[in-house]
């Protein structure tokens, strides 16, 4: 496992970002007053309309070569937990993309326990946070909601993170020995947020 340096995260007041959903087209009958049954095309249009806007997910475009992995049920559940925690913390889709890309780099979205000789000091969980660096107890940092909230508190401290390339925002929180590695997961993270933000 890559050797990482970590820093403590201080809690700050939350940043609230409100968002709305776009409504799909309505079908209106002329003579028939009964409600029409949605067609497959209409259902697909509504589903597409509720997905987050790509320009919100990847405002700067992806940087560098992109990596992608197939996810199992546990990794999908962890993705959904990160999205839920992001919403609970009042942050937007871009914050979820940064969080998921970070977790993809740190743990491949697996909630890792202590890995013995392969462990980076005492790093654990989705974000490979260290109890000895003030991220929380082992039980806390291996809880997806807690660890995501801890990461987001750090992200909120990064002035202008919304306007930074993803890898710079993630690196400012994580303080990795490999600061450019987060960039490779931006497209998959954005795809996952688009797929699961409203599910």
Image (tube, grey):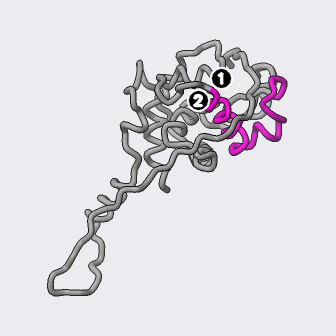
Could you say where residue 61 lies in the image, as x and y percent from the top left? 37, 27
Q: Left or right: where does residue 116 sit relative to residue 32?
A: right
In front of the other: 68 or 27 = 27
**Is residue 88 or residue 131 the one in the foreground?**
88
* For residue 157, above or below residue 145: above
Q: From the viewer's perspective, is residue 41 above or below residue 120?
A: below
Report whether 90 appears left or right of 142: left
Q: Quadrant of the N terminus?
A: top right
Q: Residues within 10 Å of mark 1 (few under 14, many from 20)?
A: many
Identity of the residue drawn at 37% across and 43% down? 53
- The disc placed on residue 158 is none
Residue marked by disc 1: 174
Residue at the top extreme, as displayed: 177
- Residue 99 image offset from top left, x and y in percent: 58, 35
User: Over which residues does the magenta segment extend?
Assistant: 131-157
Q: Residues within 10 Å of mark 2 (few under 14, many from 20)?
A: many
For numbered disc 1, what is the local secondary structure?
helix
Residue at mark 2 = 102
Image vertical order of residue 165 relative to residue 84, above or below: above
């Amino acid at each position: 496992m890559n050797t990482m340096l970590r820093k403590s995260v201080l809690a700050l007041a939350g940043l609230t970002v409100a968002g709305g959903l776009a409504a799909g087209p309505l079908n209106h009958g002329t003579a028939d007053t009964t409600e029409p049954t949605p067609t497959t095309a209409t259902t697909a249009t509504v589903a597409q309309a509720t997905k987050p806007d790509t320009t919100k997910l990847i405002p700067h475009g992806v940087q560098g070569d992109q990596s992608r992995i197939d996810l199992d049920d546990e990794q999908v559940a962890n993705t959904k937990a990160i999205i839920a925690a992001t919403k609970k913390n009042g942050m937007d889709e871009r914050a979820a993309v940064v969080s998921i890309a970070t977790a993809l780099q740190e743990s491949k979205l697996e909630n890792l326990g202590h890995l013995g000789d392969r462990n980076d000091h005492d790093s654990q969980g989705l974000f490979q946070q260290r109890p000895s660096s003030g991220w929380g107890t082992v039980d806390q940092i291996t809880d997806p909601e807690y660890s995501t909230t801890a990461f987001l508190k750090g992200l909120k401290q990064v002035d202008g993170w919304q306007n930074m390339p993803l890898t710079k925002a993630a690196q400012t929180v994580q303080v990795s020995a490999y600061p450019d590695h987060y960039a490779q997961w931006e497209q998959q993270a954005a795809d996952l947020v688009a797929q699961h933000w409203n599910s």
